[in-house]
C-alpha cells in the first residue's frame, strides 16, 4: 500500500493511546496497537503489523512520549511515518458541544475549543487534545482531523434533546442532550441496513452499543431521533463504572448528608458506580463467573443492567412505532450472548425473537441472530469506529 493513501487514526484516552493505520477505501489495516499506562513506570506498547506482534515495556512519561513510542515502533517494524508520510491523522474527540458537528481540520483555534469543552467531558476531551497536540508536533504539515462522538446526534428532535430546566440557564451553560458513541451508532446502523439489503432511509433501528461505556439509540430512516447519553456520557444505561440514570436529587443528598464535594460525587458516579460499584468488577466474564459461584451482588448487578436495557428498549419501541431491526455492537454487545438473550427475552408478542443457536454460535462477522421470518431482525454488527474516522478524515482531505 502507498503510505500516502493511509490514514493514521488515534484514540487518546487519559492513560492510553489506541491507534490504527489503515486504507480508508478498502478498510485494510496495515498496523494497529495500544500504548497503555501512560504516566506510569510500567508503560507498555503492543503493536501488530503483518501478523507480527511487537511489545515493549517501560516508562511512558506523557502522551507525547506515547506517540513517539508509537512512531519509533512503526519505524522499527518497517514503516517510518515521519519519512514515508500518511494522508491524514484522524482523531476521535468525544465532545464537540454545539460548535463541532462535522469532521473538522484542526488548527490552533479548534484545538483551543476542544480544550474549552473539557468541562462537558472531563475524562475525555483533555486527553483527546493532548493526542492532537502531540501528533501535530510529530507530523507537521500533515492534516489533523477531529471526528466528534457527538456529531451524529447534533440534530436530534427538539423534544428529545431538551432538558426541562430554566431555558436561560440551559442556553447560557450549553445544556442539552448531545449523545455519544455517535461514530459507532452511525457506522453500525449503516452496516445493519446493508445486511438487510435495504436502504438506510427505509429502516427503523434500535442500536445498543454495549462496552465499558454503553449507549442506545433510536434511528428512524437513517437519522437518530433519541439516544440514551446526554449532556455528558454519564446519562442512560448502566455501564462498567458509570451509574447511568439516577435521581438527580441523589447528588444534593450526598453533598448535604455525606458531606461530599462535587468532585467526590463526580468521581463516585463516573468511576465507582455501574457494575463496579454494585459488584466490584466491570468485566462481564468475571461478573458471570461470580454469578455462577452464587455471588448475590453480582447477580443483582446483572439484573439491574438488564432491567435498564429493557427500559430503553421499551421506550424506543414506542418512539419508533415500527422497528425493523435491533442491533447489538461493541465489546459486550458483540460477545455476550447471554446479555442479548436476556435483554430480549419473552418479547415474541412484539415480533422480537432470538434464535438460541444463532445467538451462541462462534462468529465474529455481522450476522442475524433472529429467525429469518421474525418480524424484527435482531443483528450483531461489529463496530469499526477507526474505519469510520479514517473515511471521514480522507473525505475531508479530498
Image: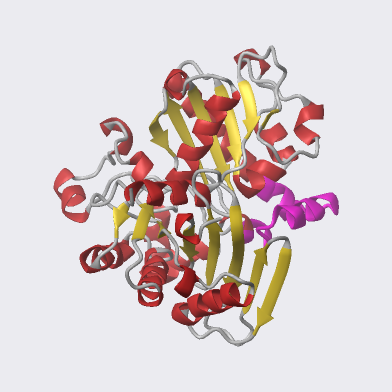
Residue 224 % position (x, y): 39, 32
Residue 369 % position (x, y): 71, 27
Main secondary structure of the magenta stretch: helix
Is residue 81 found inside the magenta-colored segment of the image?
Answer: no
Front-lying residue, 362 or 82:
82
Where residue 361 sits, quadrant-wise, is top right
| Residue 372 appears left or right of 153 | right
Quarter of the image for the N terminus: give it.
Answer: bottom right
Identify whether 89 is placed above or below 188: below
Residue at the farthest right position: 293
Residue 209 % position (x, y): 55, 43
Residue 322 % position (x, y): 49, 15
Does residue 181 appear anywhere in the picture? Answer: no
Identify whether 81 is placed above or below 170: below
Does residue 343 appear anywhere in the picture? Answer: yes
Front-lying residue, 298 or 125:
125
Front-lying residue, 205 or 283:
205
Is residue 292 found inside the magenta-colored segment of the image?
Answer: yes
x 38%, y 53%: residue = 147
| Residue 188 appears left or right of 151 | right
Q: How many labels, in total?
A: 0
x 57%, y 84%: residue = 40
Residue at the farthest left position: 168
Range of residues picked out in magenta:
276-303
Identify whether 384 is placed above or below 373: below
x 76%, y 38%: residue = 363
Amino acid at each position: 500500500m502507498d503510505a500516502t493513501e493511509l490514514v493514521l487514526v488515534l484514540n487518546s484516552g487519559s492513560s492510553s493511546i489506541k491507534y490504527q493505520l489503515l486504507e480508508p477505501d478498502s478498510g485494510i489495516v496495515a498496523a494497529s496497537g495500544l500504548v497503555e499506562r501512560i504516566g506510569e513506570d510500567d508503560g507498555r506498547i503492543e503493536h501488530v503489523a503483518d501478523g507480527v506482534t511487537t511489545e515493549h515495556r517501560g516508562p511512558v512519561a506523557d502522551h507525547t512520549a506515547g506517540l513517539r513510542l508509537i512512531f519509533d515502533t512503526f519505524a522499527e517494524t518497517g514503516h517510518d511515518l515521519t519519512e514515508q508520510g500518511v494522508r491524514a491523522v484522524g482523531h476521535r474527540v468525544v465532545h464537540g458541544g454545539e460548535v463541532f458537528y462535522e469532521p473538522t481540520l484542526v488548527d490552533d483555534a479548534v484545538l483551543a475549543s476542544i480544550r474549552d469543552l473539557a468541562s462537558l467531558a472531563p475524562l475525555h476531551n483533555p486527553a483527546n487534545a493532548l493526542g492532537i497536540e502531540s501528533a501535530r508536533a510529530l507530523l507537521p504539515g500533515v492534516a489533523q482531523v477531529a471526528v466528534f462522538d457527538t456529531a451524529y446526534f447534533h440534530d436530534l428532535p427538539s423534544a428529545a434533546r431538551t432538558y426541562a430546566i430554566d431555558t436561560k440557564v440551559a442556553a447560557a451553560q450549553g445544556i442539552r442532550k448531545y449523545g455519544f458513541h455517535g461514530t459507532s451508532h452511525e457506522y453500525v446502523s449503516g452496516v445493519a441496513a446493508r445486511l438487510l439489503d435495504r436502504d438506510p432511509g427505509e429502516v427503523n433501528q434500535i442500536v445498543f452499543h454495549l462496552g465499558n461505556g454503553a449507549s442506545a439509540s433510536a434511528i428512524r430512516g437513517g437519522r437518530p431521533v433519541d439516544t440514551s447519553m446526554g449532556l455528558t456520557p454519564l446519562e442512560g444505561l448502566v455501564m462498567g463504572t458509570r451509574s447511568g440514570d439516577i435521581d438527580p436529587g441523589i447528588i444534593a443528598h450526598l453533598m448535604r448528608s455525606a458531606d461530599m464535594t462535587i468532585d467526590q460525587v463526580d468521581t463516585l458516579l463516573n468511576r465507582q458506580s455501574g457494575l463496579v460499584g454494585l459488584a466490584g468488577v466491570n468485566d462481564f466474564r468475571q461478573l458471570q463467573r461470580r454469578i455462577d459461584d452464587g455471588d448475590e451482588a453480582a447477580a443483582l448487578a446483572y439484573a439491574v443492567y438488564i432491567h435498564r436495557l429493557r427500559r430503553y428498549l421499551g421506550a424506543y419501541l414506542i418512539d419508533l412505532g415500527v422497528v425493523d431491526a435491533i442491533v447489538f455492537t461493541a465489546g459486550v454487545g458483540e460477545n455476550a450472548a447471554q446479555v442479548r438473550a436476556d435483554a430480549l427475552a419473552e418479547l415474541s408478542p412484539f415480533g422480537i425473537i432470538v434464535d438460541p443457536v444463532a445467538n451462541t454460535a462462534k462468529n465474529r462477522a455481522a450476522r442475524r441472530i433472529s429467525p429469518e421470518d421474525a418480524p424484527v431482525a435482531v443483528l450483531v454488527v461489529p463496530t469499526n469506529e477507526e474505519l469510520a474516522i479514517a473515511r471521514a478524515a480522507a473525505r475531508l482531505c479530498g
